[in-house]
Image (cartoon, grey):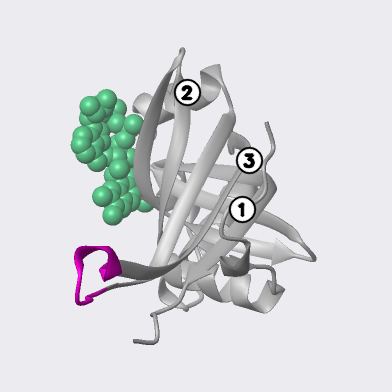
Amino acid sequence: MKKGMTRREREVTDRNEIVDILSKCKVVHLGLMDGDEPYVVAMNYGFTMEDEKLTLYLHGAVQGKKLDLIQENPKVFFEMECDVVPFQGKIACQYGTSYASVMGKGKAEILTDIEDKKKGLSIFMKTQTGKDFEFEDKMVSIVSVIRIQVSEYTAKRRPMPVL
Ligand SMILES: Cc1cc2nc3c(=O)[nH]c(=O)nc-3n(C[C@H](O)[C@H](O)[C@H](O)COP(=O)(O)OP(=O)(O)OC[C@H]3O[C@@H](n4cnc5c(N)ncnc54)[C@H](O)[C@@H]3O)c2cc1C
């Protein structure tokens, strides 16, 4: 069931602001299916936004549960957040947390082509560090690189309240 955002006024639709959130978050919570049960892992990521098309790149060890699950079912859901600042109030229900976040769904693929993996790792490092890196074949062969073609996403920002 596709449903709009409940707090519509908090939805972020400006592309530049969404890119800013994606640049800041650094860690994505990746949701996978383990048969009929959910499985979530935190991972660092890189991203590209070409026109409105969002692609995520992740990297890690060449074996493990998440890779096994992606091979069984490549459908993923993800969430990431930044600008997380708790705030206080006079009464309990005035306490809260300001944040910015992005979530969405897509299809994950474990890259096998060495040039695709190098590209993914360069994008990953650019997002994580702001710097350009080059990769030798040997370094690339000992890590896995996951590309997620995002099919749908939304972004949201809860600002600090004016008290
Ligand atoms: C902030 C942050 C950033 C991270 N960035 C990356 C990254 O960029 N790349 C990367 O590969 N990993 C990253 N990790 C680690 C990641 O969350 C997983 O632990 C790791 O990728 C192994 O996942 P796996 O599915 O292969 O688990 P496996 O190593 O196959 O382990 C299987 C079992 O171990 C347990 N387990 C695995 N991971 C965790 C965990 N994090 N906490 C508690 N129990 C766990 C679970 O019970 C799981 O079923 C990050 C973790 C954090 C918290």
Disc 1 element: loop
Disc 3 marks which residue? 113
Towards the viewer: 123 or 10: 10
Residue 121, position as x, y percentages in the image: 51, 57
| Outermost residue toward the bottom in this view | 162
Residues at marks 1 and 2 touching, judged by CB atoms closer than 8 Å: no
Image quadrant where one finds the N terminus: top right
The residue mark sitting in front, 2 or 3, is 2
Towards the viewer: 33 or 45: 33
> How busy is the neighbourhood of tag 3: few (under 14 within 10 Å), some, or many (20 plus)?
few
CA–CA distance in space, label 3 to label 1: 38 Å
Disc 2 marks which residue? 33
- Residue 95 versus residue 112 in the image, above or below: below
Residue at 45% across / 56% down in the picture? 80
Disc 2 element: strand
Towards the viewer: 138 or 125: 125
Residue at 25% across / 68% down in the picture? 95
Disc 1 marks which residue? 5
Residue at 51% across / 27% down in the picture? 70
Q: Quadrant of residue 68?
A: top left
Residue 5, position as x, y percentages in the image: 61, 53
Is residue 94 shown in magenta? yes
The residue mark sitting in front, 1 or 2, is 1
Residue 69, position as x, y percentages in the image: 46, 22
- Residue 154 versus residue 89 in the image, above or below: above
- Identity of the amino acid at label 1? Met
**Residue range (magenta):** 87-95
Q: Quadrant of residue 141?
A: top left
CA–CA distance in space, label 2 to label 3: 25 Å
- Identity of the amino acid at label 2? Met
CA–CA distance in space, label 1 to label 2: 24 Å
